[in-house]
Protein backbone atom coordinates (compact mmCIF):
# COMPACT_ATOMS: atom_id res chain seq x y z
CA UNK A 1 0.00 0.00 0.00
CA UNK A 2 2.74 2.47 1.00
CA UNK A 3 4.76 1.63 -2.14
CA UNK A 4 1.72 2.15 -4.38
CA UNK A 5 0.94 5.45 -2.65
CA UNK A 6 4.43 6.85 -3.21
CA UNK A 7 4.46 5.61 -6.82
CA UNK A 8 1.18 7.39 -7.56
CA UNK A 9 2.28 10.47 -5.63
CA UNK A 10 5.52 10.61 -7.64
CA UNK A 11 3.65 10.27 -10.95
CA UNK A 12 1.17 12.92 -9.82
CA UNK A 13 3.97 15.39 -9.05
CA UNK A 14 5.54 14.81 -12.47
CA UNK A 15 2.20 15.34 -14.24
CA UNK A 16 1.58 18.46 -12.15
CA UNK A 17 4.90 20.02 -13.18
CA UNK A 18 4.31 19.07 -16.81
CA UNK A 19 0.71 20.18 -17.27
CA UNK A 20 0.03 22.85 -14.63
CA UNK A 21 1.69 25.63 -16.71
CA UNK A 22 -0.32 24.58 -19.76
CA UNK A 23 -3.57 24.56 -17.79
CA UNK A 24 -2.80 28.03 -16.41
CA UNK A 25 -2.08 29.28 -19.94
CA UNK A 26 -5.41 27.89 -21.19
CA UNK A 27 -7.29 29.50 -18.29
CA UNK A 28 -5.62 32.87 -18.95
CA UNK A 29 -6.70 32.70 -22.61
CA UNK A 30 -10.32 32.96 -21.37
CA UNK A 31 -9.62 35.65 -18.78
CA UNK A 32 -11.27 38.98 -19.56
CA UNK A 33 -8.64 40.84 -17.58
CA UNK A 34 -5.18 41.43 -19.07
CA UNK A 35 -3.65 40.91 -15.65
CA UNK A 36 -2.33 37.42 -14.94
CA UNK A 37 -3.02 37.88 -11.22
CA UNK A 38 -6.70 38.82 -11.52
CA UNK A 39 -9.67 36.89 -12.90
CA UNK A 40 -11.94 39.31 -14.74
CA UNK A 41 -14.52 36.83 -15.96
CA UNK A 42 -14.90 34.41 -18.86
CA UNK A 43 -14.49 35.77 -22.37
CA UNK A 44 -13.66 34.71 -25.93
CA UNK A 45 -12.50 38.21 -26.84
CA UNK A 46 -8.85 37.29 -27.14
CA UNK A 47 -9.63 34.54 -29.65
CA UNK A 48 -11.55 37.06 -31.75
CA UNK A 49 -8.69 39.55 -31.64
CA UNK A 50 -6.27 36.76 -32.45
CA UNK A 51 -8.00 35.96 -35.76
CA UNK A 52 -8.11 39.68 -36.61
CA UNK A 53 -4.33 39.99 -36.26
CA UNK A 54 -2.92 39.89 -39.81
CA UNK A 55 0.66 39.13 -38.71
CA UNK A 56 -0.42 36.09 -36.70
CA UNK A 57 -2.68 34.88 -39.49
CA UNK A 58 0.23 35.06 -41.94
CA UNK A 59 2.37 33.11 -39.49
CA UNK A 60 -0.42 30.52 -39.14
CA UNK A 61 -0.69 30.16 -42.93
CA UNK A 62 3.09 29.78 -43.26
CA UNK A 63 3.18 27.20 -40.46
CA UNK A 64 0.43 25.07 -41.99
CA UNK A 65 1.94 25.19 -45.49
CA UNK A 66 5.38 24.29 -44.12
CA UNK A 67 3.99 21.41 -42.06
CA UNK A 68 1.85 20.02 -44.89
CA UNK A 69 4.48 20.24 -47.66
CA UNK A 70 7.47 19.16 -45.56
CA UNK A 71 5.56 16.19 -44.11
CA UNK A 72 4.38 15.14 -47.59
CA UNK A 73 7.86 15.31 -49.16
CA UNK A 74 9.47 13.68 -46.11
CA UNK A 75 6.90 10.86 -46.27
CA UNK A 76 7.67 10.18 -49.93
CA UNK A 77 11.45 10.27 -49.43
CA UNK A 78 11.27 8.38 -46.13
CA UNK A 79 9.09 5.61 -47.57
CA UNK A 80 11.42 5.19 -50.57
CA UNK A 81 14.40 5.20 -48.21
CA UNK A 82 12.76 2.57 -46.01
CA UNK A 83 12.42 0.25 -49.03
CA UNK A 84 16.07 0.83 -49.95
CA UNK A 85 17.36 0.25 -46.41
CA UNK A 86 15.15 -2.80 -45.91
CA UNK A 87 16.63 -4.43 -49.03
CA UNK A 88 20.21 -4.06 -47.72
CA UNK A 89 22.20 -6.72 -45.93
CA UNK A 90 22.38 -6.69 -42.14
CA UNK A 91 25.58 -4.65 -41.64
CA UNK A 92 24.87 -1.87 -44.21
CA UNK A 93 21.26 -1.70 -42.94
CA UNK A 94 22.48 -1.28 -39.36
CA UNK A 95 24.88 1.50 -40.41
CA UNK A 96 22.23 3.33 -42.45
CA UNK A 97 19.68 3.19 -39.63
CA UNK A 98 22.29 4.64 -37.30
CA UNK A 99 23.03 7.48 -39.73
CA UNK A 100 19.35 8.30 -40.26
CA UNK A 101 18.77 8.40 -36.50
CA UNK A 102 21.38 11.14 -35.99
CA UNK A 103 18.95 14.06 -36.69
CA UNK A 104 16.64 12.74 -33.96
CA UNK A 105 19.39 12.16 -31.40
CA UNK A 106 21.12 15.44 -32.19
CA UNK A 107 20.18 18.52 -30.17
CA UNK A 108 17.85 20.83 -32.11
CA UNK A 109 20.17 23.79 -31.65
CA UNK A 110 23.08 21.82 -33.17
CA UNK A 111 20.94 20.78 -36.15
CA UNK A 112 19.61 24.31 -36.59
CA UNK A 113 23.02 26.00 -36.50
CA UNK A 114 24.53 23.33 -38.77
CA UNK A 115 21.84 23.80 -41.39
CA UNK A 116 22.15 27.59 -41.15
CA UNK A 117 25.92 27.39 -41.70
CA UNK A 118 25.38 25.01 -44.62
CA UNK A 119 22.93 27.40 -46.29
CA UNK A 120 25.26 30.34 -45.73
CA UNK A 121 28.24 28.40 -47.12
CA UNK A 122 26.23 27.51 -50.22
CA UNK A 123 25.11 31.16 -50.55
CA UNK A 124 21.52 29.96 -50.21
CA UNK A 125 19.27 32.80 -49.05
CA UNK A 126 17.42 32.10 -45.81
CA UNK A 127 13.65 32.15 -46.23
CA UNK A 128 10.70 29.86 -46.82
CA UNK A 129 12.67 27.40 -48.97
CA UNK A 130 15.48 27.04 -46.44
CA UNK A 131 13.00 26.34 -43.65
CA UNK A 132 11.19 23.83 -45.85
CA UNK A 133 14.43 21.97 -46.59
CA UNK A 134 15.33 21.99 -42.90
CA UNK A 135 11.93 20.57 -41.91
CA UNK A 136 12.16 17.85 -44.55
CA UNK A 137 15.61 16.94 -43.23
CA UNK A 138 14.55 16.35 -39.62
CA UNK A 139 11.20 14.78 -40.60
CA UNK A 140 12.59 11.97 -42.77
CA UNK A 141 13.94 9.85 -39.84
CA UNK A 142 10.51 9.86 -38.18
CA UNK A 143 8.92 8.53 -41.36
CA UNK A 144 11.61 5.85 -41.63
CA UNK A 145 10.94 4.69 -38.07
CA UNK A 146 7.22 4.43 -38.84
CA UNK A 147 7.53 2.57 -42.15
CA UNK A 148 10.44 0.20 -41.39
CA UNK A 149 8.51 -2.01 -38.88
CA UNK A 150 5.71 -2.51 -41.42
CA UNK A 151 8.21 -3.56 -44.08
CA UNK A 152 9.78 -6.08 -41.69
CA UNK A 153 6.33 -7.60 -41.09
CA UNK A 154 5.74 -8.16 -44.81
CA UNK A 155 5.88 -11.65 -46.22
CA UNK A 156 8.70 -11.42 -48.80
CA UNK A 157 6.96 -13.97 -51.02
CA UNK A 158 3.69 -12.06 -51.51
CA UNK A 159 5.13 -9.68 -54.10
CA UNK A 160 6.59 -12.54 -56.17
CA UNK A 161 3.36 -14.52 -55.80
CA UNK A 162 1.34 -11.59 -57.18
CA UNK A 163 3.68 -11.39 -60.17
CA UNK A 164 3.42 -15.15 -60.73
CA UNK A 165 -0.36 -14.70 -60.90
CA UNK A 166 0.06 -12.20 -63.74
CA UNK A 167 0.28 -8.85 -61.94
CA UNK A 168 2.75 -6.28 -63.21
CA UNK A 169 5.36 -5.01 -60.69
CA UNK A 170 3.59 -1.64 -60.36
CA UNK A 171 0.15 -3.24 -59.96
CA UNK A 172 1.50 -5.72 -57.42
CA UNK A 173 3.11 -2.91 -55.44
CA UNK A 174 -0.06 -0.82 -55.23
CA UNK A 175 -2.39 -3.78 -54.58
CA UNK A 176 -0.23 -6.00 -52.34
CA UNK A 177 2.62 -4.07 -50.71
CA UNK A 178 1.17 -0.57 -50.30
CA UNK A 179 -2.02 -1.59 -48.40
CA UNK A 180 0.07 -3.48 -45.84
CA UNK A 181 2.47 -0.61 -45.12
CA UNK A 182 -0.11 2.20 -45.48
CA UNK A 183 -0.77 2.46 -41.70
CA UNK A 184 2.95 3.05 -41.15
CA UNK A 185 3.05 5.67 -43.92
CA UNK A 186 0.05 7.51 -42.47
CA UNK A 187 1.52 7.41 -38.95
CA UNK A 188 4.83 8.71 -40.32
CA UNK A 189 3.06 11.56 -42.11
CA UNK A 190 1.10 12.67 -39.05
CA UNK A 191 4.20 12.42 -36.88
CA UNK A 192 6.22 14.51 -39.37
CA UNK A 193 3.37 17.02 -39.61
CA UNK A 194 3.26 17.35 -35.83
CA UNK A 195 7.04 17.76 -35.51
CA UNK A 196 7.06 20.46 -38.19
CA UNK A 197 4.09 22.25 -36.63
CA UNK A 198 5.77 22.27 -33.23
CA UNK A 199 9.35 23.13 -34.22
CA UNK A 200 10.96 26.37 -33.04
CA UNK A 201 14.76 26.07 -32.71
CA UNK A 202 15.59 24.78 -36.19
CA UNK A 203 13.07 27.16 -37.77
CA UNK A 204 14.52 30.10 -35.85
CA UNK A 205 18.03 29.53 -37.24
CA UNK A 206 17.01 28.83 -40.84
CA UNK A 207 14.07 31.15 -41.53
CA UNK A 208 15.67 34.54 -42.22
CA UNK A 209 13.93 37.84 -41.43
CA UNK A 210 11.18 37.68 -44.07
CA UNK A 211 8.94 34.96 -42.65
CA UNK A 212 7.57 33.81 -39.32
CA UNK A 213 5.96 30.61 -38.14
CA UNK A 214 3.64 30.48 -35.13
CA UNK A 215 6.42 29.38 -32.80
CA UNK A 216 8.82 32.15 -33.87
CA UNK A 217 5.98 34.70 -33.88
CA UNK A 218 5.11 33.78 -30.29
CA UNK A 219 8.77 34.14 -29.32
CA UNK A 220 8.94 37.59 -30.93
CA UNK A 221 5.73 38.76 -29.27
CA UNK A 222 6.75 37.46 -25.84
CA UNK A 223 9.97 39.49 -26.02
CA UNK A 224 7.85 42.63 -26.50
CA UNK A 225 5.52 41.71 -23.64
CA UNK A 226 3.00 38.89 -23.31
CA UNK A 227 -0.39 39.78 -24.77
CA UNK A 228 -3.61 37.80 -24.08
CA UNK A 229 -3.78 36.90 -27.78
CA UNK A 230 -0.58 34.88 -27.31
CA UNK A 231 -2.34 32.80 -24.64
CA UNK A 232 -5.14 32.08 -27.12
CA UNK A 233 -2.67 31.24 -29.89
CA UNK A 234 -0.65 28.91 -27.63
CA UNK A 235 -3.87 27.20 -26.51
CA UNK A 236 -4.91 26.55 -30.10
CA UNK A 237 -1.45 25.15 -30.94
CA UNK A 238 -1.52 22.86 -27.90
CA UNK A 239 -5.00 21.53 -28.73
CA UNK A 240 -4.10 20.99 -32.40
CA UNK A 241 -0.93 19.06 -31.57
CA UNK A 242 -2.76 17.05 -28.88
CA UNK A 243 -5.45 16.01 -31.39
CA UNK A 244 -2.81 14.96 -33.94
CA UNK A 245 -0.94 12.89 -31.35
CA UNK A 246 -4.19 11.20 -30.27
CA UNK A 247 -4.95 10.31 -33.89
CA UNK A 248 -1.46 8.87 -34.42
CA UNK A 249 -1.60 6.87 -31.17
CA UNK A 250 -5.06 5.52 -31.99
CA UNK A 251 -3.87 4.34 -35.39
CA UNK A 252 -0.87 2.64 -33.77
CA UNK A 253 -3.14 1.03 -31.17
CA UNK A 254 -5.58 -0.20 -33.84
CA UNK A 255 -2.71 -1.91 -35.67
CA UNK A 256 -1.96 -4.04 -32.59
CA UNK A 257 -5.54 -5.06 -31.77
CA UNK A 258 -5.77 -8.86 -32.12
CA UNK A 259 -8.25 -10.18 -34.63
CA UNK A 260 -10.83 -12.52 -33.11
CA UNK A 261 -11.89 -15.46 -35.20
Image (tube, rainbow, N blue to C red):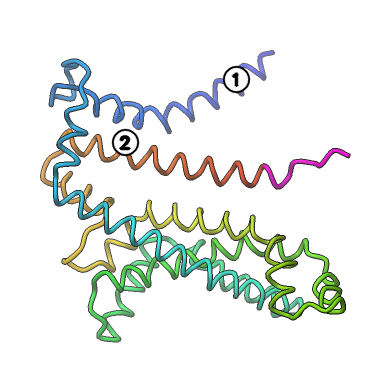
- Identify the residue shown where x is 31% and y is 62%: 203
Q: As rendered, which of 117 and 155 lies closer to the eye? A: 155
The extreme left residue here reads 224
- Identify the residue shown where x is 57% and y is 56%: 186
Marks 2 and 1 close (CB-CB < 8 Å): no
- The residues bearing labels 2 and 1 have C-alpha atoms spaced at a distance of 32 Å
Crowding at label 2, few (<14), some or many (≥20) Cα neighbours within 10 Å?
Answer: some
Mark 2 or 1, nearer chain start: 1
Tell me the number on the disc at residue 172. none
The extreme top residue here reads 1
Most common SS among magenta residues? loop
Is residue 255 a member of the stretch shown in magenta? yes
Is residue 36 a member of the stretch shown in magenta? no
Provide the secondary structure element on which disc 1 rests: helix
Image vertical order of residue 72 relative to residue 28, above or below: below
The extreme front residue here reads 166
Residue indicated by mark 1? 6
- Identify the residue shown where x is 67% and y is 64%: 148
Residue indicated by mark 2? 235
Provide the secondary structure element on which disc 2 rests: helix
Quadrant of the snapshot with the C terminus: top right
Q: Which residues are magenta?
A: 254-261
Residue 99 relative to residue 129: left or right: right
Image vertical order of residue 94 relative to residue 61, above or below: below
In the figure, residue 227 lies in which quadrant? top left
Quadrant of the snapshot with the N terminus: top right
Image vertical order of residue 163 relative to residue 214, above or below: below
Residue 37 relative to residue 79: left or right: left
In the figure, residue 164 lies in which quadrant? bottom right
Give the percent coordinates (x, y) of residue 116.
30, 73
Amino acid sequence: MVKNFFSRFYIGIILLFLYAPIIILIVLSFNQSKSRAKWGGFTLKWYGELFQNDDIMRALYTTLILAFVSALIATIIGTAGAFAINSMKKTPRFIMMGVTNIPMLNADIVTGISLMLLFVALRFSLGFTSVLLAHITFNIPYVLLSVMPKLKQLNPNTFEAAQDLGASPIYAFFKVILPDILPGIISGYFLAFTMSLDDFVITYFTKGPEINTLSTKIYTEVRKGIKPEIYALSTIMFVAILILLILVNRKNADKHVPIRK
